[in-house]
Amino acid sequence: MNRLKHTGGRALGWFLLAALLLAWLPVTPTPVAYAVNTGFRNPTANITGALGYGNGFEVSPQNAYTDDGLFAVNNNGANQRHEYYNYGFDVSNIPANAIITGIEIRLDGRVDQAANNARFAVDLTWNVAQSFTAPQNTPNLTTTEDTYILGGPLDTWGRSWTLAELADEVFAVRITSVATGVGAGQRDFFLEWVAVRVYYATARLSGTVFSDDDENGVQNGAEVGLANVPVTFFRDDGDSVFEGGGQDAQVGATTTNATGVYTSTPLLDGFSYWVDVTAPTGRTLTTPPEPRLVSIPTGADVTEVNFGYAPQAVVNPAIEVAKTPDLQYVLAGGTVTFTIAYTNTGNVTLSSVLITDTLAPNCNRNVGVLAAGQSQTYSCNRPDVVSDFTNTVQIGGVYTGTGAAVTDTDTASVDVISPAIEISKLPDLQQITSGSDANFTIIVTNTGDVALTNVAVTDPLAPNCNRNFASLAPGASQTYDCSLAGVTGDLTNTADVVAATPLGESVSDSDTASVDVIGPAIQLNKSPELQVINSGASATFTLTVINTGDVPLTNVVISDSLAPNCARSFSSLGVGLSQTYACTLPNVTADLTNTATVTCSYGAGTLTTSDTAQVRVLTDAAGCPPGLTALLKLDEAQPNPPQYADVFRAHNGVCAGGCPTPTAGRLNGGQAFARTAITGISLPPAAGQPSFNWAAGDSFAVAFWMKSNPAQTCSSERNEVIVGRTDETGGSQLQFWVGLTCEAANRGRPVFVLRDRANSATGLIQGSARVNDGNWHYLVAVRDGAAGQNRLYVDGALAGAQTVTYSAGFDSATAAMTIGWYNRAFDRYPFAGAVDEVAVYGRALASAEIANNYVANTLGYGYCQVGSADIRRFYLPLVAR
């Protein structure tokens, strides 16, 4: 029983009959659809089911006549029946000589609820409801229309049918609406179409079995047909292999008539059939093959399927024996198994048939009688084989009619093998640096006496060393190199090899190799990084070389091209050991940056590193640093009106809240700010001057000197802002400030905070050393847009760095730069202490330049001083570099 959605009819493929003229050749079957059928036919009459089973489809039962979307309805119809008939089957659609092979019932329907196992049960009557076939059931119905097919092309519903039993007056389809369980009586059934399709067969196979006296495979005029020869027909299952009585079902049998002609009963088209002829006694087939595969693709008769048999005129006793396999392998002490096949290849029966095998006595057999053409096969073995041998099996028999003896022999060889394989992974130990590649050589050798196949090398820790070889001859080797990239830790890895022997078993071996990851390292420090001297003075350096790795170093050589007095060499340097020495460069008259380089050896490798030191010679120059945006020296006594000059441009500051108090600065005067009574300076944007507005990718820096007031600094948990800028208007979230953190755990440490106006990212750097000690400290905050990095410097040294990416800028149309306070709506974060030399740059400052400025200011030189103390001598060489 099949269930499928409603589809149209199925196509029929037709094939030419001309190919059947060569019917004695093997035929490859070409199954096609069951084409010989009536198609689905509609009923034209219906009647309520048998007494006691309700009134069936009581509402519009005629709606089930055709496939038109209208339904016959069986309300509350559980276990009620209805019959449909008058399908019009006659000789106009089924030939009178046809054999009915199957009946297919199609139901299109549904149920009101998918419950109570609701389904249709169908049985058929052929004698006006006197008898019915066993019912067939649909699956449980659903609430949407579906198509259900019961029966099929080869399903005759348990009986044989004639055309007369399909006539309108006797044939009917009875449908029972089935439901079970609580509420079954409330199920409503809907039937849209009940159709019947009948499958039938008309094609026949025929031919002649004849006496082929001249053995040419063709029935000549004088060659007669052979009568009473049994012929059997089998339907091939599609694999073109004769399996008569098994997978190939028997579909008919007959015997030849007086002239040797046979004819089958009607057969289904779309299949191939085996014609099996029982060979007449004393005759030999001359028209192979037999049995013969014949195709019936179109429903038409296939004729001339002929078989010729020649009379046996010559007595030919013969016998044949075969011992297989011809060669087999076995391990020492194993058992070998043989297959012995023997055949009476003559045309007479043999007796006293005896098989002997001296080296394998288990293979001896006393066969006795062997009919002509008869074959037999058996298996035998020889256990505990310890050496190679070739043994011979012999068969003999006697034809009693003449007493003639026939014999045959066959040999088989046994090879006792010792399969073995070996793998080597080299080197056993290698030392490499972390992150380097470990390189190996793999050698695979067949150390046995037989060829190996499917040779597979696996190395879990070094998968690049995996290899596969189809075969490996005895004594042969395969050598290859491989590597493991980026090794960062010690390891011992194992390479495994496995291969298949001719016996289907495996041999294997493994080898290990160790990798020692070493960390050779050397460090060279040349100090001071910066020194300022007068022209003609000597520069003095201190050099320290340290073995910072985990292996001893040798041939340690230090060179310095600009300061040759700093060259040194040491024969060795142990792990963790160092060498420190001082050296000088006399008569320095110009700025220079010199580099000391150290080279050394470890094992087979070398290391090189270097360090630089700068010497600045005081000379006279003019001008201010490039990229300077504003410079407030804060030297003013109390201005009236309060104003603080930008000595570089026009970003003049004004008092915010209270004015700071003039005080001694780091360079000349400075300004003191109070935390208790808020005092501050604002630098509003200046028309026509470079502003403090920077884009997301711009670079800028702020530098200043500060000295905390220990009595007031960080007197609460509120942070203190020394220089900053913020904007809280129009949705902006701009924050930029440099100052002190006052939380208890980090009180007095310098902080640099930078957030763009869109708040896409916040950079925060906090120095580790506290600067609220009442001493002057030089703080520099740098945003390096090109590197995407924020940096904080304290007293000329880098205190912290952070990589931050911003999507918006740091601009505001109205916000001022503030000194000593912060312009937040909810707090001012005032600073308690003195501030001096506030410089704003429109570029990033290099580390060396910051160190230069720190030194210069410490020596008492301002940013834009002109003359012998010109500060440019400290940074111009760095900028040029």
Image: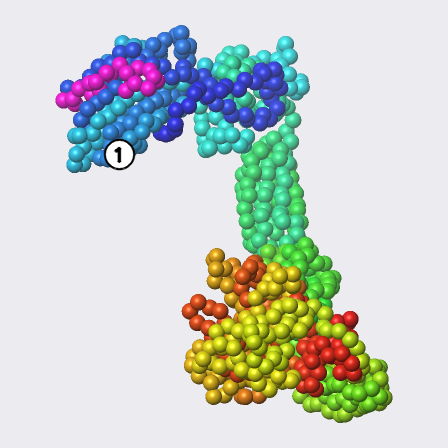
Q: Residue furthest left?
A: 52
- Is residue 345 found left or right of 623 in the rendered image? left
Q: Name the quarter where the N terminus is drawn.
A: top left
Q: Residue furthest top?
A: 92
Report whether residue 91 is seen. yes
**Residue 76 sits in quarter:** top left
Q: Name the quarter where the C terminus is drawn.
A: bottom right
Return the x and y of residue 815 as percentages of the image width and height: 53, 64
- Is residue 141 found left or right of 715 in the rendered image? left
Which residue is painted at 68% across and 57% down in the image?
A: 469
Q: Secondary structure at mark 1?
A: loop
- Say if the magenta span includes residue 62: yes
Q: Which residue is mark 1?
A: 114
> What's drawn in magenta, residue-wise?
52-71
- Is residue 560 found left or right of 171 in the rendered image? right
* Of 151 and 728, the residue lying toward us: 728
Q: Residues within 10 Å of mark 1 (few under 14, many from 20)?
A: some
Q: Residue furthest bottom?
A: 581
